[in-house]
Image (spheres, helix red, strand yellow):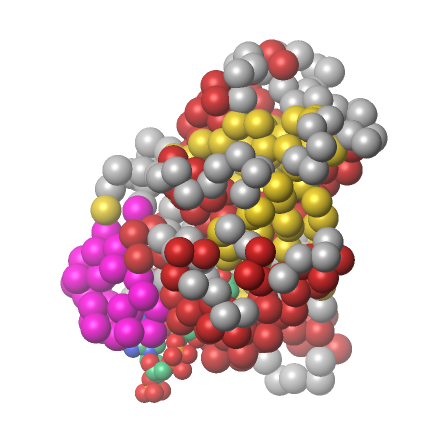
Amino acid sequence: MLRSKIGGIGYYVPDWVVTNDDLTKVMDTTDEWIQERTGIQERRYAPKFQETTSTLGAKAAAIAIERAGIRKEDVDFIIFATLSPDYYFPGCGVLVQRELGITSTEVGALDIRNQCSGFVYGLSIADQFVRTGMYKNVLLIGAELHSMGLDFTTRGRNVTVIFGDGAGAVVVQPTEKEGQGVLTTKLHSDGTYAEKLAFINPGCHGGYHSKKMGEEVDFGYPDAEYGEMFLTQHMIDNGMTYPNMEGQFVFKMAVQKFPEVIMEALNETGNSPADIDLLVPHQANLRISQFVQKRLRLRDDQVWNNIQKYGNTTAGSVPIALCEAWEAGKVKEGDLICLAAFGSGFTWASALLRW
Ligand code: UT7
């Protein structure tokens, strides 16, 4: 039976290191608070006017393509996962195609909007295309450039200190080697709590969802006309064009869903937590990863964490961490690798791979 495997992997983070102390210069926060609550010591920001989400993605992709032993012309499908696209439309898939110089119009490009679980969702999509024999070299990228869209005042501190910029990419290819490749992917969603972690404005909602929920929430439309509703002056004046998060609520859901979705993949394939060679969780908060590790009774060497250095890079976090672990020799042929993510939507997912 045809399975899919990760044939090449790469990541790219900008050189500019932003420490917690750097952030204390623009907002009321402390290195101690950030490290204690999140584990983050520093993150990377892309230099202004020099990078975009798709250029970060292209740099990671170029490495993945080379390591897969293919030419860029061999890529037959592109999947780009991000919540911070260069443009509202078109998506980053076509922009990365152009940036890489892939000129063939036979290539399809798909953008997905699954935030923190975007890469694992993308892997599931790539897996389906490769298993059916439709594509042979699917380029899957998870990338974020958060630093351009965060609130660098004290008002935004609960969100801003967490996020960083970066990209990871893989080439998903067919394999017929016995037991190798993606064994299963598990995808879940629950839209009930969509606004608990959201970047609501600008958008085409017109306040609809707040009314439906019966809440007296200011969604930014005191007296806007059609044509003005996508982005109102009221939204800009009142700092409503930034991401917002009910951190504790999201935290509680995350520590419940991560173990659930990991166990689902393990049970389906007849494995147990002890069989995992490496768990690469989405880097949302070091405390979340530690909770999951404890719940599954995993040893330290079975879990890869790098949030300390890069913060939360959302769709980029799983492939960056996986690539870093691979480069460190922690992902070897025959290893059982588990990827897992939870985030805005809420959406959550896991993937189990035999490397
Ligand atoms: O990747 C997508 C999924 N996202 C997540 O999984 C994130 C899940 N949530 C979290 O990681 C945590 O909830 C946060 C790290 C976001 C926040 O940590 P927390 O321990 O839940 O803090 P909190 O929001 O309950 O806030 C506690 C206090 C508040 O002050 P008061 O009301 O107790 O006086 C905040 O105003 O900490 C304050 N605070 C800060 N203080 C210094 C919030 N942000 C900061 C900050 N620096 N950056």
Q: Nearer the viewer, residue 340 or 30?
A: 340
For residue 189, side relative to residue 94 (left or right): right
Residue 11: x and y in percent read 42, 35
For residue 154, side relative to residue 291 (left or right): left
Q: Can residue 207 be seen in this view?
A: no
Assign ligand 1 to one image quadrant: bottom left
The boundaries of the magenta stretch are 18-44
Count how many numbered circles sit on residues in the image: 0
For residue 339, side relative to residue 29 (left or right): right
- Say which quarter of the image contains residue 231: bottom right
Residue 123: x and y in percent read 65, 42
Vertical arrangement, residue 180 with respect to residue 194, above or below = above
The quadrant the N terminus occupies is: top right
Vertical arrangement, residue 196 with respect to residue 302, above or below = below
- Say which quarter of the image contains residue 79: top right
Q: Nearer the viewer, residue 254 or 181?
A: 181
Vertical arrangement, residue 175 with respect to residue 153, above or below = above
Residue 170: x and y in percent read 55, 33
Asked whether 240 falls inside the magenta stretch, the response is: no
Q: Which residue is drawn at 55% across and 61% down?
A: 274
Q: Residue at x 49, y 51 (%)?
A: 278
Q: Nearer the viewer, residue 226 or 165?
A: 165
Q: Residue at x 45, y 32 (%)?
A: 10
Q: Which residue is drawn at 51% across and 51% down?
A: 277
